[in-house]
Image (tube, rainbow, N blue to C red):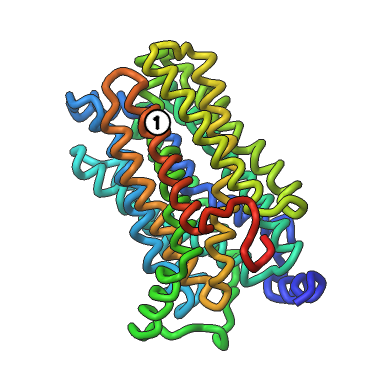
Amino acid sequence: MTDINADAWVSSTHRPMGFAEFVVIIALIMALNPLATDMMLPALPNIASAFHILTANRPQTVLSTFLVGFGIGQFAVGPLSDRFGRRPMLLGGMTLYCLASACSIAAPSFETLLLARALQGLGTSATRVIATSIVRDCYAGRRMASVMSLAMMVFISVPMVAPSFGQAVLLLAQWRGIFIVLMLYGMTALVWSALRMPETLPMSERKSLAVRDVLGAFRQTVTNRQTLGYALAAGGVMGSLFGFVFSSQQIFTEVYRLGPYFPLALAAVAAGTAVAALLNAKFVGRIGMRAISHGALIGFVAVAGIMLVAAKMHLLPLPLFMALAALMTFAFGLIFSNFTALAMEPQGHIAGTASSLYGSITTLLGIGVGIWIGQAYDGTLLPFATGFFLCTLAALAVVLVVEKGRLFRPHRMAA
């Protein structure tokens, strides 16, 4: 299908929605997940105080529980949307997200809050998977790449500003005010999608939900060396990022004493990911996915090693930590999107199911590793730096196995 034909098909399917509105609504949907994660960071001490939590690292579960729901939900969302269509799953996911946000506002206990957060994550699993599927349904070629690039820029930029939004809400209201903002945002996305986003998967292209067919697609995904290998490697790299997110509030406020200004430091570090996304979009067509991602992974290991040595020697002042952390988020921005593309490369015939399974593997593995790093925090940077180094070293080892020791160049298929 050419770009012209793809655009013509979309214009008839999305009438009267234009290209600009389509990009905005996809970005709005995709931003639900990072907003619900990163806006909570400034509120963790307030939540701990409200529920009389004395264990220092336990408030991190407000983040990790949300992400567990997000990871588990992806297992089912892809196959269900391939069978029943994109629109029911998308609207159902956002409805669940709004209801869970309301439950979070009224949560009488910390355990109830964690349950509501898990349901929030479950709801956003639909928005993340379905938004990508809708783009794939509607566009092809360069036009599809344009939509995804513009939407991903919003997705990547949200973590840079969301903690500051959360901090601003805390200046005007208590921590429950953040959930009010999240619920209102979710309701806006839900109403807009309900009014303007049509079904994008024709009945003729719906797939069976027979157990044999679904399990067969799962088996094809996990038995493919390249898909499984890059999923595991991406999960390791994501684990280091989650470890940073889970620990960031404590690191910046307890180790570096930044207090309410820590969202600004976090935004500065996260900016590396946005810069990397721009550079990757510009150069990946010339250099190739493997060359960029493998080089970035080796650089990630080197920077993590420097951070580990500096932490062991107690020579990690704030400027050096910021610089190294920014370099690592920059490397992550070059690694993750290319690892995803490499993992999906052999799975074109079952892309929807494979995408769901890939998302679940990387998210759940990343959460497990991130929780391990976050819960190991002991008031110093050593557990964090150690976890970063081990995660990236393991990811590099997996990639070496997948590529049979031959980095930077594909074996058969051009990257």
Looking at the image, residue 358 lies above or below residue 171: below
Instruction: Work out whether residue 130 or residue 410 is closer to the camera in this orientation and state it.
Output: 410
Which residue is drawn at the image coordinates 65% and 56% (left, top)? 409
Instruction: Work out whether residue 27 or residue 410 is closer to the camera in this orientation and state it.
Output: 410
Q: Position of residue 109 (x, y in %)?
A: 18, 38
SS state under label 1: helix
Mark 1 neighbour density, 10 Å: few (under 14) some (14–19) many (20 or more): many
Residue 184 visible to an observer of this rendering: no
The answer to whether residue 389 is left or right of residue 188 is left
Which residue is drawn at the image coordinates 69% and 68% (left, top)? 139
Looking at the image, residue 134 lies above or below residue 1: above
Farthest front residue? 405
Looking at the image, residue 226 lies above or below residue 98: below
On-image quarter of the C terminus: bottom right
Name the residue beneath numbered marker 1: 41
The answer to whether residue 279 is left or right of residue 304 is right
In the rendered picture of this protein, how many numbered marks are placed on residues?
Answer: 1
Which residue is drawn at the image coordinates 45% and 40% (left, top)? 392
The answer to whether residue 340 is left or right of residue 92 is right
Which residue is drawn at the image coordinates 49% and 46% (left, top)? 185
Residue 166 visible to an observer of this rendering: yes
Instruction: Work out whether residue 370 or residue 399 is closer to the camera in this orientation and state it.
Output: 399
On-image quarter of the N terminus: bottom right
Q: Position of residue 402 (x, y in %)?
A: 49, 59
Picture quadrant of residue 134: bottom right
